[in-house]
Structures are given as C-alpha cells and as structure tokens.
Image (cartoon, grey):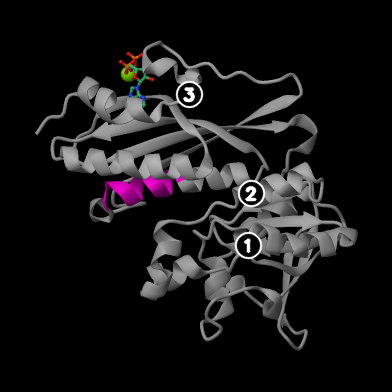
Amino acid sequence: MNLDEFFLIEKYFKPLATNKAAQNLSDDAAKISLKVDEELVVSKDMTVEDVHFLKSDGGYNIAAKLLRTNLSDLAASGAVPLHYMLGFSKTIAMDEKFVKEFAQGLKDTQNEFALNLIGGDTVKAHDKLFFSLTIFGKIKKKQILSRKNAKNGDLIFVSGNIGDAYLARVLGNKKFLSRHLLPTPRIKLGQTLAKNKLSQCAIDVSDGLLADLQHICDESNLSADIFSDKIPVSDKSVPILDLISAGDDYELIFSAKKQHLKKILSLSKTLDVKISCIGYFKKDQKNSINLFDSKNNKINFSQYGYRH
Ligand code: ADP
Ligand code: MG
C-alpha cells in the first residue's frame, strides 16, 4: 500500500501538534518563543531499521524509544522539554497500522514528558525505514549542565542501575526488556540539579559508563577514580566490565561538590530515582579513568576496546 503523505500528517501527526508553536502544521515553519534569559537547547537523534531497531519491534516502541533517547540528551543539559520535529520515512511495505502505533508511541511519550510536535518532513524510502527526531528544550542561561564543567575534587554520581539494557539485549534477560525498549530519560533529575545549582556537569550514558565518563574527563581535563563495588548494577554475577562498557542505559552521570552530597542523595527519595556516588574527579596529566576493585586494586580494562 502506498500511504498518502498528507493523509498521514492530517490523521496521525496533527493531533500531536497541540501547541501554538506548531501553527497546526499549516505554515512553512514553526516558531519557538523564549524569554531573554533563556537558552534554546537542541538535539537530534536518528534511528535506522536493522541498525538501531527491527521492524518487528513495532511502531509504538520504535517511536517511543526515539523520543525517549532524545529526551535523555535534554536531561543531560538540565533543560525543560518543549517541542520536537519528526523526520518520517515511509516505504511501500509500510501499512497504516504501523503509522497508527508509531503515532501512539509518540503521543504517550509526549504526554508523559509534557512536550509536543511542531513539524517535520515526510519522505519515501526504498527498503529500510529510518526516522529522525529533533528535540527543543529551554533552560535559564546560567543553569545549563555541560560535560565541560566538572571540577577537580568533584564527586561522581550516576542515576539508576548501569547495564540493564545489556542484560536484556545481550544476555536475553526478559526482566529488563522494558529498560532496553523504553529507557527512562532522567528529565526531572537533570532539571532539579540545574535549577538548584547542585551540579554544572552531566552527560547521559548512551555508549556505556566508561565511554561517557571518559567524555567528561576529556572535556573537563580531569581524571576519574571510580570504585567497582559502588557502581549500581542489577546483576552482580555479570562481569562489571561488560555492564559498564555496554551502553544504551540513558542514565545520567553527573558531578557535584562534596558539600552537596547529602542534598543529592536525598533527591533519590523526592524524585524516586536511585542515585549512587561512584568516585571522584582528580587533576593529573592523563585525563583517564582509574577503576578499582573492592580491595583497591586497579582493574585493567584496556582489552575492552576502550579508548584512553
Ligand atoms: P514542505 O513542503 O515545506 O516540506 P510539507 O508539505 O512537507 O512542507 O509539510 C507540511 C506541514 O506538515 C509542515 O508544517 C511540516 O512541518 C508538517 N510535516 C510534514 N511531515 C511531518 C511529520 N512527519 N511530522 C510532523 N509534521 C510534519
Ligand atoms: Mg516536506
């Protein structure tokens, strides 16, 4: 079946364009208003059939994960989600049921995180499906979190448990399937850290704890000492290096001054998210990560294809 582009927009995407910024998808461009002391935070993610998803995952999960992973980028900046734009491909083989479920996945996620669709583009594709989503958020200029902003002596925190997506995706543990298919972007946590000036530095874990922590080290010019028995995991029988190299966690790593330790740990209750302190940043010439076991012996992880 060859679905008509205007029919799809009218029936499935217009109902998601609930804000006046979208101008009911009837103008050439959307308009986003900001106050003078606010910054627009923008991020884009693309997802491609057979690389990032299987068609058998279903339209609902494909759309929801795409929006949730994009929201995770906003979470890492501390921004409040506002809007998103959608790049949508349709193949000859795509049926209306798929589009309907895709739109439902977007709808439930945009309701959960209070944002809305403001436009996009629709193209014909040959065999593989692909989707692209650009997300917009706002934040007060002075509050934005960045991977550049860690300071010598700051404590290192992570949200949630690390490696759950790996337990589902690679080890086939069904208990963690929803953590893999529908990750939880830590929007409230990012916002709370930023608003209360508890942190200036965060990153979301998409490539793995080690890889993403290394990004902070590189950009902030610091090394990190972290302790394996402090890293929160769901299954202690799985090698820790597998769990912290795997990625797709969409948890936050963030840094904070020691004096904020208590306040940060107490956010765990108010925001209903696990928060763990896993180590600290220090200044040396290496800008690298040192991982220690429970006996304070250094664990070598160079064989993990991990870049120093
Ligand atoms: P243009 O010719 O400028 O590309 P289109 O005819 O493609 O415009 O789109 C018409 C309107 O529908 C625009 O407001 C556009 O943002 C919106 N639109 C098109 N595709 C999508 C989509 N996949 N999701 C959301 N909005 C869309
Ligand atoms: Mg177009």
- Residue 134 visible in image: yes
The residue under the point 35% across, 45% down is 105
Q: Position of residue 210 (x, y in %)?
A: 63, 64
- Name the amino acid, label 1: Val
Q: Position of residue 48 (x, y in %)?
A: 34, 45
The circle drawn on residue 188 is: 2
* Residue, disc 3: 19
The residue under the point 57% across, 68% down is 162
- Name the amino acid, label 3: Asn
**In magenta segment, residue 168:** no
Image quarter (top left, top right, bottom left or bottom right) of the N terminus: top left
The earlier-in-sequence mark between 1 and 3 is: 3
Whereabouts is ligand 1, in terms of quadrant? top left
Q: Residue furthest left?
A: 1
Q: Residues within 10 Å of mark 3 (few under 14, many from 20)?
A: some
Q: Position of residue 235 (x, y in %)?
A: 52, 80
Residue 62 to residue 125: above or below: below
**In magenta segment, residue 59:** yes
Q: Position of residue 42 (x, y in %)?
A: 58, 32
Residue sitting nearer the eye, 49 or 144: 144
* Residue, disc 1: 273
Q: Residue furthest front?
A: 270
Q: Give the total of numbered labels.
A: 3
CB within 8 Å, label 1 to label 2: yes
The residue under the point 38% across, 18% down is 25
- Residue 219 visible in image: no
Span shown in magenta: 58-67
Q: CA distance from mark 2 to mark 3?
A: 21 Å
Query: Could you say whether the residue bearing mark 1 is in a helix, strand or loop?
Result: loop
- Tell me which corner region of the image, top left, top right, bottom left or bottom right, holds residue 107: top left
Query: Could you say whether the residue bearing mark 3 is in a helix, strand or loop?
Result: loop
